[in-house]
Amino acid sequence: MNTHIFSGHAQLPEGTNLSVNHRLATVVMEIDMESGQIVDSSIPIYCDLHGDVISEIFCGKNIEYDISAIIDEINERVHSLSTKALVSSIQVVYNRYLLVKQELSHKRQR
């Protein structure tokens, strides 16, 4: 397994409890570059319960093929003022994953 760590950040909405202590929502994922499977994840700004439920949504899914299902499930199950920021940070991770995967593919072709 060839895993890489990715993080995504998005600005939290002003006036929320989280924005008082944190400026950004952060998502960190360990992803297998060969399969796209999310091996582990962390959402460090949330309490353990919140982060654990979100990590449960991610783990075992494929970042490349399940991104829409991940975002749909987040929108369905996570009801907080920071959900949009969370979704934005997931999209940043997804975009970074695609860029790194493309770079690795180009290196292998050389």
Image: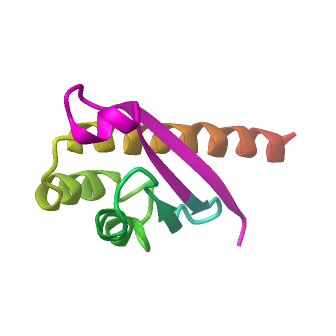
| Vertical position of residue 45 compared to residue 11: above or below | below
Residue 53 % position (x, y): 29, 69
Q: Residue at x 45, y 56 (%)?
A: 63
- In which quarter of the view is residue 7 placed? top right
Q: How many marks?
A: 0
Residue 11 % position (x, y): 36, 28
Question: Which residue sits furthest right?
Answer: 110
Q: Nearer the viewer, residue 56 or 106?
A: 56
- In which quarter of the view is residue 89 placed? top left
In this rendering, would 8 be left or right of 54? Answer: right
Reply yes or no: does residue 8 show up in magenta. yes
Q: Residue at x 74, y 45 (%)?
A: 104
In this rendering, would 34 be left or right of 60? Answer: right
| Vertical position of residue 18 compared to residue 71: above or below | above
Q: Residue at x 71, y 38 (%)?
A: 103
Q: Nearer the viewer, residue 39 or 51?
A: 51
Residue 19 % position (x, y): 31, 33
Residue 93 % position (x, y): 49, 43
Q: Could you tell me which quadrant the N terminus lies in?
A: bottom right
Q: Nearer the viewer, residue 23 or 4?
A: 23
Reply yes or no: does residue 4 show up in magenta. yes
In this rendering, would 14 be left or right of 5? Answer: left
Q: Coloured how?
A: rainbow
Q: Give the magenta-colored segment's residue range.
A: 1-29
Q: Could you tell me which quadrant the C terminus lies in?
A: top right
